[in-house]
Image (cartoon, grey):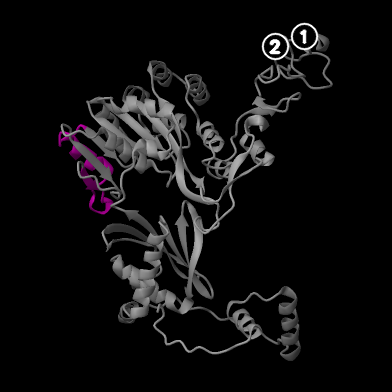
């Protein structure tokens, strides 16, 4: 059905089928390949080598490309690729040309899975079909291009962003899928713990200021901002969103596309929006100093601004804003809260089982060994595509700015000071939130390691109990053991062979306890 060819069934032995597969796709053993090479060299001794110089790629015949992309098999292949992505609820489609075939990979729950293989001779026509749909130049195959397709399947309207990249085997295409009809979730459905929910509830009630959602691409920042915006909705207020592209349809808000090609940038639209009498403004992303400056001044003049930024954690966001060029006094005055987030895969509830935590992963994450008894794990089943995971949930770090933090931001602060003060005030870091979700059986330690990665804190292992503690601690907070080879007078480290402290002059027998 996909190729449009007439299928003629024939009977063949399994050995003949395997031989044909090896002939087409390769996969011979090393010894077999080496034996064939030796036979070839014996029969055809190499006397000279001819170098084949490849000419510059000639201009494509546009009419041929258009006609080949419109034949029914190619149309059906492209439709099947997109429909399969929607069926798997994939966020991205990768069409990657290889030497002997083209593979189609889908990003499902943040991970790429190979699902379809198509013959390499159909690749150019398939790419041409996608480029025509995305209103791109089909004759240009040597430069990267961007396009967009809006399609309707049943009652769903799907926006597809298309990007092409020339590779040695042909053009690679990546398509980002945005379901415009996706329902906006409540904050509690995203995986925010009850204590952090209360903090967000306080920010939502604020009449002005900035709330920043931060994290890498694909960590659910826009989903979080729309959930917060949905909680704020009142018929007595004016809501404006500025995005590239608009990811959710919200009937009660005025939504604007950013189009850099015609000069419609975030900063220019934001300035115009301020003249539209807004109460709440959602800015898709702060990308430069100009956008940041307008957004912060909007927050100081009585507007509530929701926006996102690419940083690793909450405290690093403040440093990034200063690096962009925002003045510290603007940051301390305008910011009401910062949310750092990541997305982890949830353990499949159809095949969930328990397992003993891997000590090597605990060591990499710097988590004490006695933190967990047993942890959840997915065996893999047909429901979760044998991965052991089904769906995703967020990890969150909610940082609420108070007067003490505002004073520190205006001074010459250190990130570690802000983080320690925030944790002392009850803030759960991303790893703390992840540990809570592992204890609840929602996700696994492997997912924490994959998404958050090993922390790079200045730590050491206690010589007595083996727990990981801060390098600056003289006493272990778990067992009370005093750190050896430390001068008791000035607290500086000493080498084994030293008889006295070189920093304060105290004798070794006095310095070591």
User: Quadrant location of residue 236?
Assistant: top left
Residue 289 in view (yes/no): no
Contact (Cβ within 8 Å) of mark 1 with mark 2: yes
What residue is drawn where x is 65% and y is 28%?
459
CA gap between label 1 and label 2 equals 9 Å
Is 259 covered by the magenta stretch? yes
What residue is drawn where x is 44% and y is 35%?
340
The percent coordinates of residue 288 (x first, y second) are 34, 40
What residue is drawn where x is 28% and y is 25%?
205
User: Quadrant location of residue 364?
Assistant: top right
Is 370 covered by the magenta stretch? no
Nearest the viewer among 116 and 145 is 116
User: Would you place residue 233 above or below residue 128 in this image?
Assistant: above
The percent coordinates of residue 151 (x first, y second) are 28, 62
The percent coordinates of residue 464 (x first, y second) are 76, 23
User: Quadrant location of residue 204?
Assistant: top left
Residue 284 in view (yes/no): yes
For the C terminus, which image quadrant?
A: top right
Question: Considering only order in the chain, which callout, 2 or 1, is on the residue closer to the N terminus?
Answer: 2
For disc 2, the marked residue is: 490
Nearest the viewer among 152 and 261 is 152
Please provide the residue range marked out in magenta.
254-279
Q: Secondary structure at mark 2?
A: loop
For disc 1, the marked residue is: 506
| Label at residue 477 | none
């Amino acid at each position: 059905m996909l190729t449009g060819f007439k299928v003629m069934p024939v009977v063949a032995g399994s050995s003949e089928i395997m031989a044909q597969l090896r002939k087409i796709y390769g996969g011979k053993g090393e010894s077999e390949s080496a034996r064939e090479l030796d036979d070839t060299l014996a029969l055809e001794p190499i006397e000279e080598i001819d170098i084949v110089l490849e000419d510059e790629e000639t201009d494509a015949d546009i009419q041929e490309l258009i006609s080949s992309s419109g034949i029914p098999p190619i149309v059906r292949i492209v439709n099947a690729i997109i429909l399969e992505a929607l069926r798997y609820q994939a966020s991205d489609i990768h069409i990657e040309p290889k030497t002997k075939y083209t593979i189609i990979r889908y990003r499902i729950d943040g991970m790429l899975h190979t699902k379809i293989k198509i013959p390499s001779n159909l690749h150019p026509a398939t790419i041409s079909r996608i480029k025509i749909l995305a209103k791109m130049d089909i004759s240009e195959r040597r430069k990267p291009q961007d396009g967009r397709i809006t399609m309707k399947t049943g009652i769903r309207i799907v926006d597809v962003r298309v990007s092409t990249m020339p590779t040695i085997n042909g053009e690679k295409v990546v398509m980002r899928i945005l379901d415009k009809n996706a329902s906006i979730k409540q904050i509690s459905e995203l995986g925010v713990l009850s204590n952090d929910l209360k903090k967000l509830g306080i920010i939502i009630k604020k009449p002005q200021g900035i709330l920043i959602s931060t994290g890498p691409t694909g960590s659910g920042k826009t989903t979080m901002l729309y959930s917060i915006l949905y909680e704020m909705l009142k018929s007595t207020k004016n809501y404006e969103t500025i995005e590239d592209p608009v990811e959710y349809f919200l009937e009660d808000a005025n939504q604007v596309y950013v189009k850099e090609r015609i000069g419609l940038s975030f900063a220019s639209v934001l300035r115009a929006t301020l003249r539209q009498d807004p109460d709440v403004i959602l800015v898709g992303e702060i990308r430069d100093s100009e956008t940041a400056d307008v957004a912060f001044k909007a927050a100081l003049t009585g507007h509530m601004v929701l926006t996102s930024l690419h940083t690793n954690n909450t405290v690093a966001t403040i440093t990034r804003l200063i690096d962009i060029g925002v003045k510290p006094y603007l940051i301390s005055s305008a910011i009401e809260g910062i949310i750092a987030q990541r997305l982890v895969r949830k353990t499949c509830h159809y095949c969930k089982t328990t397992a003993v935590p891997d000590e090597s992963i605990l060591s990499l994450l710097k988590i004490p060994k006695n933190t967990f008894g047993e942890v959840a794990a997915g065996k893999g089943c047909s429901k979760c595509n044998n991965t052991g995971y089904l769906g995703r949930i967020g990890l969150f770090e909610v940082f609420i700015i108070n007067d003490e933090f505002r004073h520190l931001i205006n001074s010459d602060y250190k990130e570690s000071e802000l983080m320690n003060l925030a944790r002392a005030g009850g803030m759960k870091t991303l790893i703390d939130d992840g540990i809570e979700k592992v204890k609840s059986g929602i996700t696994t330690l492997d997912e924490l390691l994959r998404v958050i990665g090993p922390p790079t804190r200045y730590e050491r292992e206690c010589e007595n109990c083996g727990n990981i503690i801060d390098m600056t601690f003289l006493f272990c907070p778990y067992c009370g053991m005093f750190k050896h080879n430390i001068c008791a007078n000035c607290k500086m480290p000493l080498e084994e062979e030293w008889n006295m402290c070189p920093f304060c002059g105290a004798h070794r027998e006095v310095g070591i306890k």
